Image (cartoon, rainbow, N blue to C red):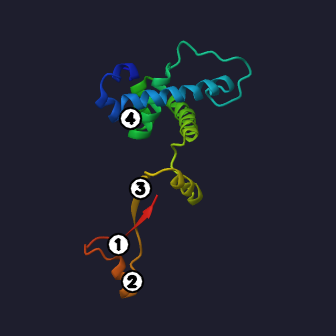
């Protein structure tokens, strides 16, 4: 049984578990991604080569709607199953899965970048965002550090637990 958005759109728990988005967020992003898909489809083939003739959507294409394309790429990004499992879920070959992942991940990244939803990676970009917005979410990850030799410095890193010495760093 092929996985499509129409089959799951009325089940909010399934949508969230497969994509991390609720139905409203999913459909808003789908509309925006469709604009980028139309722009891309006019210029390139599925393999990424420049199109020499006008484009038409094939009747036998695997991912017919923008909702199905978005479901496909979000399912891949959230669940990260092997490509054979995605192929079984969407009834396509592993080679097709690989092509669609490459194409749609680039389009999704570009669409999210244009909306300003990608994380900031440079300090200068983060400063600009902080000046404009009042609410900012930070993500920190504990990372292993070598135990300092100096006893005074060791106290700064000691949490009282008998575990690895970790330091919080911003991602």
Would you name the residue on which mark 4 appears? 21
Picture disc at residue 153: 2
Q: Is residue 100 left or right of residue 141?
A: right
Give the secondary structure at mark 2: helix
Q: In the rendered image of this protein, does residue 85 appear above or below residue 117?
A: above
Task: Give the Cα distance between marks 4 and 3.
Answer: 19 Å
Task: Give the Cα distance between marks 4 and 2.
Answer: 44 Å
Tell me the mark number nearer the camera, choosing from 1 and 3. 3
> Measured from the top left, where is residue 51 in percent x and y?
71, 24
Foreground pick, 31 / 76: 31
Looking at the image, tell me whether mark 3 or mark 2 is earlier in sequence order: 3
Q: Are marks 1 and 2 in contact (CB under 8 Å)?
A: no
Task: Give the Cα distance between marks 3 and 2.
Answer: 25 Å
> Measured from the top left, where is residue 91 in percent x and y?
43, 22
Looking at the image, tell me whether mark 1 or mark 2 is earlier in sequence order: 2
> Measured from the top left, where is residue 161 in percent x and y?
25, 72
Looking at the image, tell me whether mark 4 or mark 2 is earlier in sequence order: 4
User: Which residue, as the protein is rendered here, is positioned at the far top?
Assistant: 59
| Mark 2 Cα shell of 10 Å, populated few (<14), some (14-19), many (≥20) | few
Would you name the residue on which mark 3 appears? 139
Q: Is residue 126 left or right of residue 165?
A: right
Q: Is residue 132 left or right of residue 150?
A: right
At a point 44% along the width and 64% down the height, the residue shown is 169
Would you name the residue on which mark 1 appears? 165
């Amino acid at each position: 049984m092929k996985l499509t958005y129409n089959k799951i759109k009325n089940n909010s728990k399934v949508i969230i578990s497969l994509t991390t988005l609720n139905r409203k967020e999913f459909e808003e992003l789908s509309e925006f991604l469709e604009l980028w898909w139309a722009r891309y489809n006019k210029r390139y083939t599925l393999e990424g080569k420049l199109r020499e003739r006008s484009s038409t959507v094939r009747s036998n294409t695997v991912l017919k709607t923008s909702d199905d394309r978005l479901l496909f790429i979000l399912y891949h990004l959230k669940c990260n199953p092997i490509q054979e499992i995605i192929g079984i879920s969407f009834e396509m070959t592993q080679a097709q899965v690989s092509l669609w992942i490459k194409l749609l991940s680039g389009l999704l990244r570009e669409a999210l970048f244009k909306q300003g939803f990608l994380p900031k990676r440079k300090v200068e970009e983060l400063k600009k965002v902080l000046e404009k917005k009042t609410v900012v979410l930070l993500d920190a990850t504990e990372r292993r550090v070598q135990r300092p030799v100096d006893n005074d410095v060791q106290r700064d890193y000691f949490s009282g637990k008998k575990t690895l010495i970790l330091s919080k760093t911003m991602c």
